[in-house]
Amino acid sequence: MADFHKSLNAARKKVSGVVSLRELGWRRESRSFLSTGISQLDELLGGEGLPVGRMSEFYGSASAGKTSLVSGIMAGVTARGGCVAYVDFFNSLSPEFLRAAGVDLENILWVRGPGARRPEKDIGQDDLDYGNDPDPDGRAVIILRRALKQSEILVKSGNFTLVVLDLAESSSVRGGGAAASGGMLLPKSAWFRLQRAAEKSKSVLILLSGRRTTSGASARVLALQGGKGLWGGEPVRPGKDVSSPHDLGNREKRALLLGMQASLSVMKGGRNGRSIIFHCHL
């Protein structure tokens, strides 16, 4: 060990900025972070949240809490005067939902996409050029590549604190380089291209998807799963006859759905395998 440090010090005298790989392994990641707004989650992610200049992925089935989680992050960004770009692949975003979550809509750029239903006449050469691997699924993947390219441009612009690429509940979107039945495939190079764009920026890039998609390109990966509903009002009395429309309406008023309790697990980039329970708003 003494000989190692002696050699290292001698090299430093000759070449400015020399550092050993061993020292790099000991160094903590040197970058700023964006809080998720959930202190327990920030702690699981290393104590500070999502890294700036990196891509993070939130995945889970429908009603798993992805939109609630990201809208809370967006609310924090806009409350501090930051701007958010939201690339909405399937045009499924609800401004009313964001407003209810506390997001300042004046600081949101909403890029509305048609998803896989876009007419073929609108496909340009730029879409075909994004990614070099074969396109086994045709038009749908070309349009998805367009969404990735839009996200890349927004991240590179440096004008947004947060860029969100929302693939909605499209569990058929997969990462990989070979065809598989029942899914739209993108080459891994497409996700790593986004990763490189994020690394050169001062933005946080978040991907929302139905299943884990980005392979090793994301620095943080969170898996979400929906849980039980959170009900308000008066409980329905056991055994009460609700066969009539009048009674059914009363039951619905008593059992008002206020939100949902969901679980969130860190799959990469923090205390892997640890989970927390959080509340999703409606």
Image (spheres, rainbow, N blue to C red):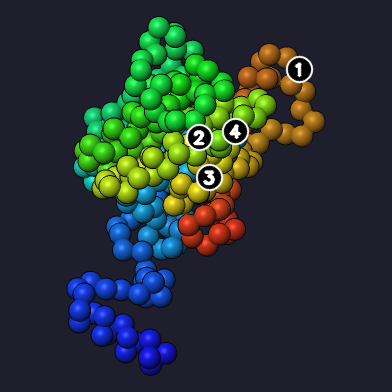
Residue 84 in the image, given as x and y percentages of width and height? 29, 36
Is tag 2's residue or tag 3's residue first in the polypeptide sequence? 2
Front one among 187 and 146: 187
Q: Looking at the rendering, which quadrant does residue 234 occupy? A: top right
Residue 231 in the image, given as x and y percentages of width and height? 59, 37
Q: Which residue is found at the position 33% from the left and 55% from the top? A: 33
Give me the C-alpha separation between circle 2 and circle 3. 10 Å
Asked if marks 2 and 3 touch (Cβ < 8 Å), the reply is: no
Is tag 1's residue or tag 4's residue first in the polypeptide sequence? 4
Exactly how many numbered labels are in the figure?
4
Q: Amino acid at mark 4?
A: Ala
Q: Amino acid at mark 1?
A: Ser
Is tag 4's residue or tag 3's residue first in the polypeptide sequence? 4
Looking at the image, the residue that sits furthest to the bottom is: 2
Give me the C-alpha separation between circle 1 and circle 4. 54 Å
Asked if marks 1 and 4 touch (Cβ < 8 Å), the reply is: no
Residue at numbered disc 3: 215
Give me the C-alpha separation between circle 2 and circle 1. 54 Å
* Front: mark 3 or 1: 3
Query: Which circle marks residue 178 in the picture?
Result: 4
Residue 47 in the image, given as x and y percentages of width and height? 41, 63
Q: Amino acid at mark 3?
A: Ser
Give me the C-alpha separation between circle 2 and circle 4. 8 Å
Give me the C-alpha separation between circle 3 and circle 1. 51 Å
SS under mark 3: loop
SS under mark 2: loop
Give me the C-alpha separation between circle 4 and circle 3. 14 Å
Is tag 2's residue or tag 4's residue first in the polypeptide sequence? 4
SS under mark 4: loop
Asked if marks 2 and 1 touch (Cβ < 8 Å), the reply is: no
Residue at numbered disc 2: 187
Q: Which residue is found at the position 38% from the left and 91% from the top? A: 3
